[in-house]
Image (tube, rainbow, N blue to C red):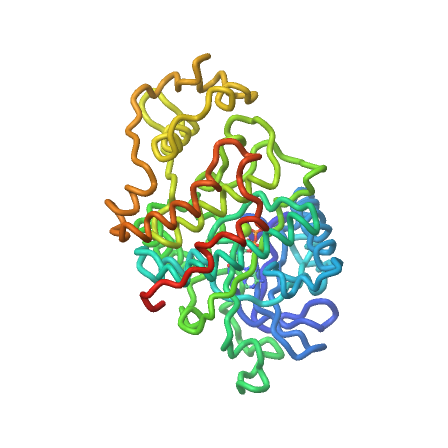
Amino acid sequence: SYRKGGYHAVRVGDQFAGGRYIAQRKLGWGHFSTVWLAYDTNTSAYVALKIQKSAALFVQAARHEIEILSSIADGTTPSNSKCVAQLIDHFKHTGPNGQHLCMVLEFLGDSLLRLTKHFHYEGLPLNRVRDICKCILIGLDYLHREHCIIHTDLKPENILLVSTIDPAKDPVRSGHTPVLERPEGNINSGVTSLIEKRLKRRARRAVAKISGRSDSIIGTGEAPKSDRNIDAIDVRCKIVDFGNACWADKKIAVEIQTRQYRAPEVILQAGYSFSVDMWSFACIAFELATGDMLFTPKVGEGFSEDEDHLALMMELLGKMPRKIATTGAKSKDFFDRHGDLKRIRRLKFWPLNKLLVDRYKFSGNDAHEFSEFLLPLLDFAPEKRPTAQQCLQHPWLNCKDSTPS
Ligand code: ADP
Ligand code: MG
């Protein structure tokens, strides 16, 4: 992808925006961009520099993301305190592969995906799950209520931890020295060497194996880095990646969300609103507490991934009301007129409460309380799901359990 229209190759020490930002190390990448840790010489702080691919499609996507992020940053409440990543600056950068739009964001830590990995995919202590859930909800409430923005791609990869002790964040106090120019003979360039690439691929495959995620699901692969900021967390986090976000009254895409976090109304093409983010949020909360994704649909003999997904939802949540099942633009592809799946006839019901006890060894009480929190968010009727604001009032978020986190 490091070709015309693709990624911009970056080397440590490269300068951006007339020398204001200096590249330090690669933080991650997605389908659209590479993200670098950069030193801001104006403010003497570290920032995340997101460098978009240069083809027209990506430029357009970056313009959209900048528009959304700017409107968030312009809000009356300081978005910095609102669990949403802050846009600091944006500019164009011309390189051998074309002109790249660049976004400067506040520098954040590891993603929730990495956090679940850190806990060996066995789930986090419930007190930590609660703290993270509160942050995500504060972010969602802010996006939904103050900005009328639907994120549409909420998943663990797109929620990053805020680390309290991060040497890279306060270079002066920590004595961490930023790279200010390109090191002599730096062959370890942004154009990743073949060996490095192969190692990364192997590392990613290992993750995929453990978590059951395929490379394509991971999508935004993260560069391997130490887990140092995981041990230091006070479990605050922020929502990132507004590349797919939209205003509720100006929707762009019909097919939204990453598969496992996709709401039923999106599969059925029955229209959507803020409540799709609440569905994804519930999937994330479950994943944090158990280490497993809530729904991992697969294509099978005689049925599609969509059909498997709907079947899995009904096995956990009970039958979808006929009215909801039959009113989407794609309903006829999946359901007969009675509201039964056409090609998956036998469902094995396994309610959430029981799943948490049987498979995840929750105590009866924990399972009951956590189910009470999650189930309203997983209502098949989107308008019945609690809003982020309502969800923040839920007693589960404020109960303390005895197990230390
Ligand atoms: P894309 O739109 O290409 O998917 P993302 O915004 O998801 O790009 O960023 C890709 C990756 O870069 C993220 O998964 C994360 O690892 C890293 N990243 C993004 N934003 C930041 C940030 N503000 N601070 C630290 N790392 C970040
Ligand atoms: Mg992404």
Residue sitting at x 60%, y 41%: 274
Q: Is residue 346 found left or right of 25 in the rendered image? A: left
Front-most of residues 11 and 25 = 25
Front-most of residues 307 and 46 = 307
Could you tell me residue 125's position as x and y percent?
35, 61
**Residue 178 in the image: above or below residue 108:** below
**Residue 269 in the image: above or below residue 241:** above
Q: Is residue 111 found left or right of 72 in the rendered image? A: left
Q: How many marks?
A: 0
Q: Quadrant of the C terminus?
A: bottom left
**Residue 204 in the image: above or below residue 400:** above
Could you tell me residue 74's position as x and y percent?
75, 59
Residue sitting at x 52%, y 26%: 268
* Residue 308, visible in the rendered structure: no
Q: Is residue 113 found left or right of 211 in the rendered image? A: right
Could you tell me residue 221's position as x and y percent?
46, 53
Front-most of residues 350 and 9 = 350
Could you tell me residue 246's position as x and y percent?
66, 43
> Residue 83, located in which quarter of the rendered image?
bottom right
**Residue 300 in the image: above or below residue 292:** above
* Residue 218, visible in the rendered structure: yes
